[in-house]
Amino acid sequence: MNQLPPPNFSRSDLPEHKHQRVLVAAFQVGHPIVVDGKASHIYAFGGQQIGGHVEMVIYLPGDPTPIDASRVSLQKQPE
């Protein structure tokens, strides 16, 4: 009987994974984001594992079109 190896729950330090974690935190606290120069908020997000990496998509309020997470950045807060 073949047993699967135990899962590895250590965090990845890849830049795209760090970016995804920042976007999840922005969703949790309602931090504004920018997509293609327009301000918005994350309404929902999803992801799937493709090959060896995780692909993340973002959904904006009122728009059912998925947006690749790499196109999303945090909106700068006034100082």
Image (spheres, grey):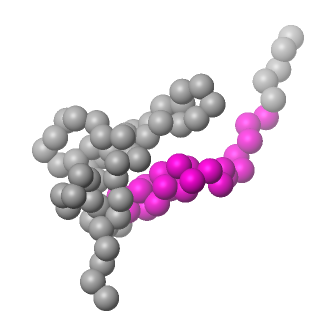
Name the residue located 33 percent from the left edge and 44 percent from the top edge: 58
The residues colored magenta run: 6-28
User: In which quarter of the view is residue 56 placed?
Assistant: top left
Question: Image check: 14 left or right of 54?
Answer: right
- Which residue is the extreme one toward the left? 62
Query: Against 18, is 30 above or below?
Result: below
Residue 19: percent from left, percent from top:
49, 55
Which quarter of the rendering shows the C terminus?
A: bottom left
Question: Image check: 66 left or right of 7?
Answer: left
Question: Is residue 8 visible to the viewer in this orientation of the structure?
Answer: yes
Which quarter of the rendering shows the N terminus?
A: top right
Query: Against 38, is 48 above or below?
Result: above
Residue 25: percent from left, percent from top:
43, 61
- Which residue is the extreme one toward the front? 37
- Which residue is the extreme one toward the right? 1
Pick the residue in front: 62 or 50.
Answer: 50
Name the residue located 74 percent from the left edge and 42 percent from the top edge: 8
